Every structure is written in structure tokens, then in C-alpha cells.
Image (tube, rainbow, N blue to C red):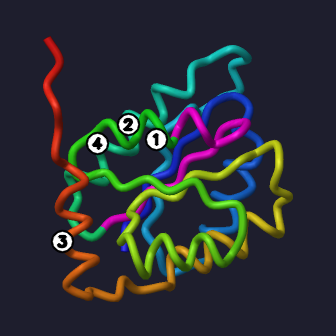
Amino acid sequence: MKIFIGSDYRGFEKKQILLEYLSSSDYEVEDLGPYEYNEGDDFNDAAINVAKAVRENLGSKGILLCDSAHGVTMQANRFKGARAAHCENIKSAMLAREHDDANILCLSAHFLDNESIERIVNTFLTTDFEPLERRIRRINRLDEREDYA
């Protein structure tokens, strides 16, 4: 499985630690930036890059980190096919995968320590979607849009 990972400056340090952790796995991991600490960069850039990469690479997953995880979650979910979930514990990561087939995990660099991040990431990456009819129906509706004038 291919994993795309990105952050803003608030998540940069934990992204680097997570990249090192994932490098010992069987996953193919691609860092989509930033590649150096740049205080004041925008979370939008990483979320856009990861959402587009996940959308274009069927079966891949994404991981995003920012201060609260709210901004990257909102930005990533603006892309058709992206199902970003803000998860703060193992149970939420499990449910995001099992029930909602989330393909992008959004993590708070402020509220989560490195060990918690590793456990949540492991759960997210190893939990399969349970394709019940009602879940598939609901997921298909996520890309419904209302156009604004």
C-alpha cells in the first residue's frame, strides 16, 4: 500500500518522526511536504497535495498532521473521493476505516504524543472497511454537491 504524508509547520516535527517510524514498514511512503520547517506555512498546501494524491492512486492512504487537525481535515474533504477523518484515538481510527472507508487520517500534532500517533496510524492502516450496503450507500453520497451561485 502506498501512503502519502504531509503536514504544516506545526506538524512538521511529528511528521518527520512518523516518516522514520513508517520507513521500517512494508508500506511505500511518499512525503508530500513540507520538506523543511517553515514557520507560518499554510496547512492547505499539504492537505491539497495529499488529497489529490490519494484520489489519483486507487487503494492508497494519506496521513496529514497540523496543530489541531481541523484545518487539514476540512481542506482534504473538499476533494471528490477524499474521505478524511480526524482521529484522536484508536477507536475513532478503527471506526473511520470500518464504517466510513476513510482514506486520509488527520492527526493533531498538539494533542497527540508520538506513541499515540503510532498506535492510531497502525490501527488506521490495518483496519479494513466492512462493506455493508448501508455504508456503501452513505459513502457514495459524500460526493454529492450543492453548487452555489
Task: State which mark lies toward you, 1 or 2.
Answer: 2
Asked if residue 6 lies left or right of residue 54, the reply is right
The three-letter code of the residue at mark 4 reads Lys
> What percent of the width, then of the height, locates residue 39?
73, 17
Return the disc, 3 or 4, that comes first in the chain's sequence.
4
The three-letter code of the residue at mark 2 reads Asn
Return the disc, 1 or 2, that comes first in the chain's sequence.
1
Return the disc, 1 or 3, that comes first in the chain's sequence.
1
How many angstroms separate mark 3 from mark 4 (CA)? 23 Å
Pick the residue in front: 134 or 143.
Answer: 134
Tag of residue 32: 1
**Residue designated by label 2:** 49
Q: Secondary structure at mark 3?
A: helix
How many angstroms separate mark 1 from mark 3 (CA)? 31 Å
Give neighbour class at mark 3: few <14, some 14-19, many 20+ (Cα, 10 Å).
few
* Proximity of marks 1 and 4: CB atoms separated by less than 8 Å: no
* Proximity of marks 1 and 3: CB atoms separated by less than 8 Å: no
Q: Which residues are magenta?
A: 60-72
How many angstroms separate mark 2 from mark 3 (CA)? 27 Å
Q: Secondary structure at mark 1?
A: loop
* Proximity of marks 3 and 4: CB atoms separated by less than 8 Å: no
Pick the residue in front: 118 or 85.
Answer: 85
Residue visible at 38% across and 70% down in the picture: 100
Return the disc, 1 or 4, that comes first in the chain's sequence.
1
**Residue designated by label 3:** 137
Q: Quadrant of the N terminus?
A: bottom left
Task: State which mark lies toward you, 3 or 4.
Answer: 3
> What percent of the width, then of the height, locates residue 138?
25, 67
The three-letter code of the residue at mark 1 reads Leu
